Image (cartoon, rainbow, N blue to C red):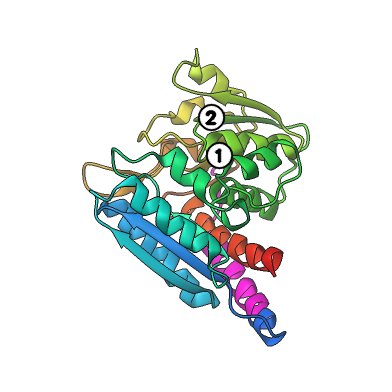
Amino acid sequence: MSAKIIDGKKFAAHLADNIKGEILQWVTDGHRAPGLAVVIVGDDPASQVYVSKKIKMCEQVGISSSLHRFSADTGQQELIELIDQLNQDPKIDGILVQLPLPGGLNEEQITERIDPKKDVDGLHPYNLGRLAAQSPLLRPCTPRGVMTLLENINVDLAGAHAVVIGASNLVGRPMALELLRARCTVTICHSRTRDLPKQVGQADILVVAVGQAGLIKGEWIKPGSVVIDVGTNRSEAGHLIGDVEFEAARHRAAWITPVPGGVGPMTVITLMQNTLQAARNLS
């Protein structure tokens, strides 16, 4: 067996064309272009790359973007004041604060300061709560992007055993809620989980989001399963690799996402979807 590759880059490009058309129609109907404000603090190289990709995608699909850069020693109050201004700005539909923030800043307080209607990252407790209550508004980007990929390959989720490795508020927890909403039986694994190989071996759908290269061994994978690798790590040679041993896993799985080119592009394009949705909700 050799798994089929889930090409997130190719599918994201297809979605980008669709979103561009929707925004063009939105503007033709008399609305202004959706506006996204991106806030980045510090000079973390990975964050700089992610922000650059998001700004570039805004230009591609027709979203008006503004970038707010701050040094790593910026204080909490200065960020809060900016978010308050953006919350009140009628030309801004979405606010994204690039995470992680430098040490000394309270990420929870910053996230909760964003108007839930402009929370295009979907991480405000209001939006996470709506997802938990099965009445989502703005959904977290990476989990929503993963669900879009699963829908695209026509995998039957109802009744499937989904195992999520990682319990962060950014990916793991909302991912589990998304899968539960799709009628999966869901297991969440974390740093205290016992017998991780056994848990992985039971997964019809496996989503790994830890950030630890090679954590999931290929021989653990259930034959015929779907493997979604959210992890992004640098190898000693400087190459991007995931949390799953890709080459070994692809000989057991039916479908698998590569790193790079799998989930990452879907996260970016989902941000564009959320921004357009926020603009419609606010109009």
- Residue range in magenta is 1-23
- Asked which quadrant contains residue 110, the reply is top left
- Going by the numbered disc 2, the residue's amino acid type is Ile
The answer to whether residue 82 of the structure is visible from this angle is yes
Residue visible at 29% across and 38% down in the picture: 104
At x 70%, y 63%, the residue is: 281
Return the x and y of residue 118 as percentages of the image width and height: 58, 58
Residue 209, given in percent of the width and then of the height, sits at: 47, 37
Would you say 210 lies left or right of 122 here? left
Q: Residue at x 50, y 25 (%)?
A: 220
Q: Secondary structure under badge 1?
A: strand
Callout 1 crowding tier (Cα within 10 Å): few <14, some 14–19, many ≥20: many
Between disc 2 and disc 1, the foreground one is 1
Sequence-earlier tag: 2 or 1: 2
Instruction: Residue at 55%, 37% (x, y): give it.
Output: 207
Which of the numbered marks, if any, corresponds to residue 221?
2
Q: What number is the disc on residue 227?
A: 1
Q: Disc 2 on helix, strand or loop?
A: loop
